Image: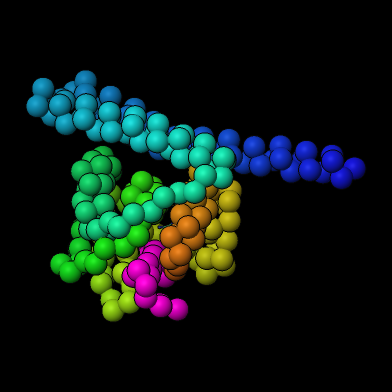
Amino acid sequence: LKDEVGRMERLSLVGQMAASITHEIRNPMAVIRGFIQLLNERSPTEQQSYFHLVLEELDRANSIINDFLSLAQNRIVERESCDLNEVLGELTPLLWADANMRGQTIDMRLSPHMERLLLNDKEIKQLVLNLARNGMEAMNDKGALRIETVNDENSVQLRVVDQGVGIPKEQLERLFEPFYTTKTNGTGLGLALCLSIVERHNAKIEVESKVGEGTAFIVTFCKPGRKCW
Ligand code: ADP
Ligand code: MG
């Protein structure tokens, strides 16, 4: 019986992993699909920028698969000294393209004084994209998504703030549960992955939300060698 339980647990883990991969790959696939559709209608100069984004998203899908494989093999995710503002800067064209497709805008407010943090830049991009896409999905067109960095004494805050529908109190504690979703096409794995990325960075994630006004996800990173909480 014990062996049977072990086998079942392994199988369900494989199932969960497969579902996570599906979820994470769907995002870049949806973007690629959207851009390919747009390519038909656009001028050659505009086409060039879409080609570039399509290739970037394909690369991203590829690295997500790699990341999940390394996760499955329990490999250690390496972190190195990074400037969070630079990592966000590399994401900006993609975020803007996403926002444009929805008629929304991105309001980047990066702290002018940024200290370096120990980060895995791929994971941080994944984190920000997941939070940003949730924010955009919660807003109607014309909404602005604010992405902010704040340099405190011992920590750095990353805030993703939307003007969306907000989250009722009773849903707040379930947000990070794997498979928790209120969307018809959601899988509820985005925030679960965000939480695991945050934990691997010894950071913390908090949510502030008001129904009808919007939501803020706040990630706090401890500066190297500093005590934050
Ligand atoms: P999914 O996006 O596939 O539903 P997530 O794990 O990314 O899964 O999010 C889980 C749920 O949390 C969403 O279905 C939604 O109900 C809620 N949620 C997450 N981010 C926001 C947000 N910015 N505004 C409102 N609701 C949100
Ligand atoms: Mg999501």
Position of residue 119 in the picture relative to residue 191 (left or right): left
**At 35% from the left edge and 69% from the top edge, which residue is drawn?**
224
Q: Quadrant of the N terminus?
A: top right
96 or 60: nearer the viewer: 60
Q: In this view, does 186 lie above or below 222?
A: above
Position of residue 6 in the picture relative to residue 68 (left or right): right
212 or 79: nearer the viewer: 79
> So how many labels did they put on this image?
0
Residue most extreme to the right: 1
15 or 62: nearer the viewer: 62
When asked about the image quadrant of residue 50, the answer is: top left
107 or 182: nearer the viewer: 107
Q: Is residue 64 above or below residue 153?
A: above
**At 31% from the left edge and 62% from the top edge, which residue is drawn?**
117
Which residues fall within the magenta stretch? 207-229
Asked if residue 30 shows in the view, the reply is: no
Position of residue 86 in the picture relative to residue 166 (left or right): left
Q: Is residue 110 above or below residue 18?
A: below
Residue 90 placed where, x, y %? Answer: 22, 47
Q: In this view, does 168 lie above or below 29?
A: below
**At 56% from the left edge and 45% from the top edge, which residue is drawn?**
74
Q: Is 216 a magenta residue? A: yes
**At 71% from the left edge and 40% from the top edge, which residue is drawn?**
10
Q: In which quarter of the image is the C terminus?
A: bottom left
Residue 46 placed where, x, y %? Answer: 13, 29
Give the color scheme: rainbow, by chain, secondary structure or one colour.
Answer: rainbow
When asked about the image quadrant of residue 113, the answer is: bottom left
Residue 161 placed where, x, y %? Answer: 32, 63
Q: Is 95 a magenta residue? A: no
Asked if residue 202 shows in the view, the reply is: yes
